[in-house]
Image (cartoon, rainbow, N blue to C red):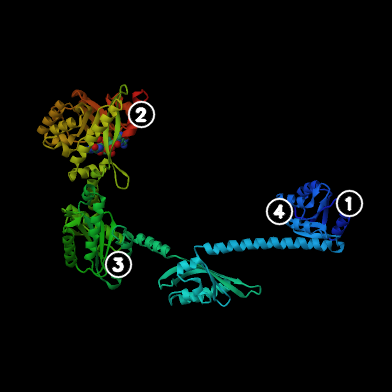
């Protein structure tokens, strides 16, 4: 970068010393700095060194022609823009002609008028600067014009009297008006409705106060259509500060508005059916509750759930399920009365909100009619589907005074309707207390869990006390519920037993255990005997032993690979049958353990007649072992009993080294518990096994 000079620098090129001296003196006197060159070569070198602001160049040079030098200077990177004046003889027309052709800016004739030389040079410089500024502003104008022309936003310029003086192509594209139609007009012709008048006035006030305004107007196109537009207005003032031009930039925001509306709609509506969603239902319910409070009226919330919807989804596909839901939504909408709302809560659940629904009998009649409508056959993807629904009803204000409580209670009543055999409605009753409801709900979820593959198996190793050999592993079920939480078996096995699901769950556990066993074996792992828990209801099946044998044969697993854990109470229910079943199981090759031994009421006498292999000492005794002498005494007698009956003993829930040492001292055969390992998911158990088999129990 060149430093800014305080004086302009003139390069004087002349071979005559006297001429150079006078020129220098004259120019310095006139306020210039001067550098001199006596030849073309010197001039070129100096030019590149000093970057002069003006060059005065004599046509005749000893080592060449001044015109050629001019051409050479113009070819240099910083030589294109420097004013060059050729000094020629007064009649040397040919030189003047050549000088202009070579790019000279001006010429000065000899004899030089010394009195005006400095002025002439200054003028040359000023003219040159003016030309440069002009070129620059022309460039800016061209850029501005192309922005104006190419802009996607409409641009409208008005004069100080607010008459349109210019529009761009985007204006015509957006509004449909050719420029000539609107020139001289008031831009108010664009604004569509009367409602915008106040806004129009506010816009003017702001524009005049702040010189700028932004906002939305509804505009009208030439064909009469209206559209929302976003405006950015600015006001340009003249030197006196008076308004000179108004500039409006605007763009059609119809699309953006549609998208905004769609987003707003989606926030409160279900995308599939277009019905209000959970949030909007809660909102409407809050309004209805407030209204009911004011006029002491009663209303109802009906919770509707399609029966066995999951089967339809799974067997016929989601597209089919979606179409069914759309039709259900239509039927529910058809059943509405003025002021009612129907919303979709998600999945196959709908809620009807009926303010002022009246007394119980009236609601019941409506519910019945609705169920009948929903049970009419559906035509979905060329199929005729028969579907029913279950409905729970909560009335307000009696059954709740907040949207959450009412919906929850209607939902609970719906579970009762499912429990009552589906395709019916039930009213919420306070007797449906929390524990019954949560049990009903658990049962429903449990039914779904099996189909949804939400069960997982964990494996907990058992070790021999004496030498730490691997004695086996217990298979323990876990349920990963909809919320992704692991539910322990004590929470759901009793419910599964009561509702009869335990059979299917037990079959799944056995099949999954066998599948995993085979997979581990195929992967080269040494798998110990896997102990599977059997529930009372499974064991009570008439053909339990035969069924187990058949299932294992089908699954391709040898019964010797499986131990069955039964509880004392199961065995004692029907002693004769138990003896026969155990006999058959042993014949088939299973080994048998009694789980939680010591907690039931075994008749020790009968125990003798049962074919058993293992007594598992319940973890409650192990826990108390070190503190409670009675617990120690029970453990001692279980071990003695086992020894007398020739059974192995496995202590459950061994957590500490002290417990282990005492149990070993008492002669307990094996142990299971956190001291060895916690129950592990299949992959972790495989890793544990690998490490164990390498002789490094982790
Ligand atoms: N505090 C403590 N606990 C320990 C320790 N070591 C193991 N446990 C836990 O003790 C329970 C032992 O299983 P269980 O007596 O057969 O008792 C089992 C069994 O009766 C039943 N169960 C588990 N899986 C199945 C299954 O597949 N079918 C059936 N029918 N019942 C199952 O659920 C019961 C509970 O199982 P889990 O919750 O897995 O609880 C397991 C296990 O996680 C320890 O050192 N300290």
**Left or right of 691: which side holds 244?**
right
Quadrant of the image containing the C terminus: top left
- Residue placed most toward the observer, 493 or 657: 493
- Residue placed most toward the observer, 539 or 383: 383
Residue 2 visible here: no
Nearest to the eye among marks 2 and 3: give it: 3
**Residue indicated by mark 2:** 657
- Residue placed most toward the observer, 109 or 211: 109
Q: Indicate the secondary structure of the residue bearing disc 4.
A: loop
Rounded to the nearest whole Å, what is the CA distance between mark 1 and mark 3?
Answer: 109 Å
Image coordinates of residue 582 in percent, x first then y, are 14, 30
Q: Decide if ligand 1 comes within 8 Å of the CB at mark 1.
A: no
**Left or right of 61: which side holds 142?**
left
Image coordinates of residue 195 in percent, x first then y, are 43, 76
**Residue indicated by mark 4:** 80
Q: Earlier in the sequence, mark 3 or mark 4?
A: 4
Count residues near mark 1 (Cα–Cα under 10 Å), then give few for <14, some for 14-19, many for 20+. few
Nearest to the eye among marks 1 and 2: give it: 1
Indicate whether 159 appears above or below 309. Answer: below
Q: Earlier in the sequence, mark 4 or mark 2?
A: 4
- Residue 17 shows which numbered tag? 1
Image coordinates of residue 598 in percent, x first then y, are 22, 33
Nearest to the eye among marks 1 and 3: give it: 1
Residue at the image position 21 percent from the left and 59 percent from the top: 392
Nearest to the eye among marks 4 and 2: give it: 4
Rounded to the nearest whole Å, what is the CA distance between mark 4 and mark 2?
Answer: 96 Å
Q: Earlier in the sequence, mark 2 or mark 3?
A: 3
Count residues near mark 4 (Cα–Cα under 10 Å), then give few for <14, some for 14-19, many for 20+. few
Residue at the image position 70 percent from the left and 62 percent from the top: 131
**Residue indicated by mark 3:** 289
Count residues near mark 2 (Cα–Cα under 10 Å), then give few for <14, some for 14-19, many for 20+. few
């Amino acid at each position: 970068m060149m430093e800014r000079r305080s004086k302009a620098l003139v390069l004087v090129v002349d071979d005559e010393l006297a001429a150079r001296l006078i020129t220098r003196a004259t120019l310095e006197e006139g306020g210039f700095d001067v550098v001199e060159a006596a030849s073309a070569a010197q001039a070129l070198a100096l030019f590149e060194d000093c970057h002069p602001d003006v060059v005065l160049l004599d046509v005749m040079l000893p080592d060449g022609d001044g015109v050629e030098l001019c051409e050479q200077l113009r070819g240099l990177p910083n030589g294109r823009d420097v004013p060059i004046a050729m000094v020629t003889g007064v009649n040397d027309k040919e030189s003047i002609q050549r000088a202009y052709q070579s790019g000279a800016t001006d010429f000065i004739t000899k004899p030089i008028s010394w009195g005006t030389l400095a002025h002439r040079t200054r003028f040359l410089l000023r003219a040159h600067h003016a030309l440069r500024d002009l070129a620059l502003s022309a460039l800016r104008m061209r850029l501005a014009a192309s922005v104006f022309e190419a802009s996607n936003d409409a641009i409208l310029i008005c004069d100080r009297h607010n008459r349109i003086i210019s529009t761009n192509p985007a204006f015509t594209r957006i509004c449909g008006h050719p420029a000539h139609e609107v020139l001289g007009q008031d831009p108010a012709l664009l604004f569509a409705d009367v409602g915008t008048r106040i806004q129009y006035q506010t816009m003017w006030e702001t524009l005049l106060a702040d010189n700028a305004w932004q906002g939305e107007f509804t505009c009208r196109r030439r064909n009469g259509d209206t559209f929302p537009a976003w405006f950015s207005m600015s006001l340009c003032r003249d030197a006196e500060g008076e308004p000179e031009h108004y500039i409006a930039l605007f763009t059609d925001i119809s699309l953006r508005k549609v998208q905004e509306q769609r987003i707003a709609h989606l926030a409160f509506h279900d995308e599939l059916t277009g019905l209000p969603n959970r949030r909007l239902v809660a909102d409407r319910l809050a309004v209805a509750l407030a209204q009911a409070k004011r006029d002491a009226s009663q209303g109802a919330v009906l919770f509707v759930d399609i029966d066995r919807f999951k089967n339809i989804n799974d067997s016929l596909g989601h597209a089919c399920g979606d179409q069914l839901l759309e039709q259900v939504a239509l039927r529910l909408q058809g059943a509405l009365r003025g002021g009612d709302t129907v919303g979709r809560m998600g999945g196959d659940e709908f809620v009807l909100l009926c303010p002022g629904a009246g007394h119980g009998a009236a609601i019941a009649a409506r519910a019945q009619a609705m169920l009948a409508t929903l049970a009419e056959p559906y035509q979905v993807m060329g199929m005729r589907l028969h579907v029913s629904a279950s409905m729970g009803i909560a009335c307000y204000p009696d059954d709740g005074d907040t949207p959450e409580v009412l919906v929850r209670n209607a939902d609970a009543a719906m579970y009762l309707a499912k429990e009552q055999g589906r395709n019916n409605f039930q009213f919420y009753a306070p007797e449906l207390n929390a524990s019954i409801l949560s049990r009903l709900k658990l049962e429903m979820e449990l039914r779904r869990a099996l189909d949804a593959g939400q069960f997982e198996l964990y494996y907990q190793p058992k070790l021999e006390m004496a030498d730490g050999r691997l004695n086996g592993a217990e298979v323990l079920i876990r349920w990963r519920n909809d919320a992704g939480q692991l539910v322990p078996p004590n929470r759901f096995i009793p419910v599964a037993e009561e509702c009869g699901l335990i059979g299917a769950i037990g079959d799944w556990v056995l099949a999954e255990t066998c599948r995993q066993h085979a997979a581990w074996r195929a992967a080269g792992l040494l798998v110990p005997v896997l102990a599977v828990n059997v529930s009372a209801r499974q064991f009570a099946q008439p053909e339990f032993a035969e069924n187990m044998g058949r299932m294992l044969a089908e699954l391709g697993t040898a019964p010797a690979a499986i131990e069955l854990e039964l509880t004392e109470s199961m065995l004692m229910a029907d002693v004769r049958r138990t003896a026969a079943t155990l006999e058959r199981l042993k014949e088939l090759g299973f080994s048998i353990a009694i789980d939680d031994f010591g907690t039931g009421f075994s008749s020790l006498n009968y125990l003798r007649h049962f074919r058993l292999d293992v007594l598992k000492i319940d973890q409650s005794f192990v826990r108390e072992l070190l503190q409670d002498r009675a617990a120690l005494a029970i453990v001692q007698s279980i071990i003695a009993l086992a020894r007398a009956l020739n059974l192995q003993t496995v202590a459950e829930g061994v957590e500490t080294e002290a417990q282990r040492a005492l149990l070993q001292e008492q002669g307990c055969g094996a142990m299971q518990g956190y001291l060895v390992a916690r129950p592990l998911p299949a992959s972790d158990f495989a890793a544990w096994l690998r490490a164990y088999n390498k002789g490094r129990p982790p």
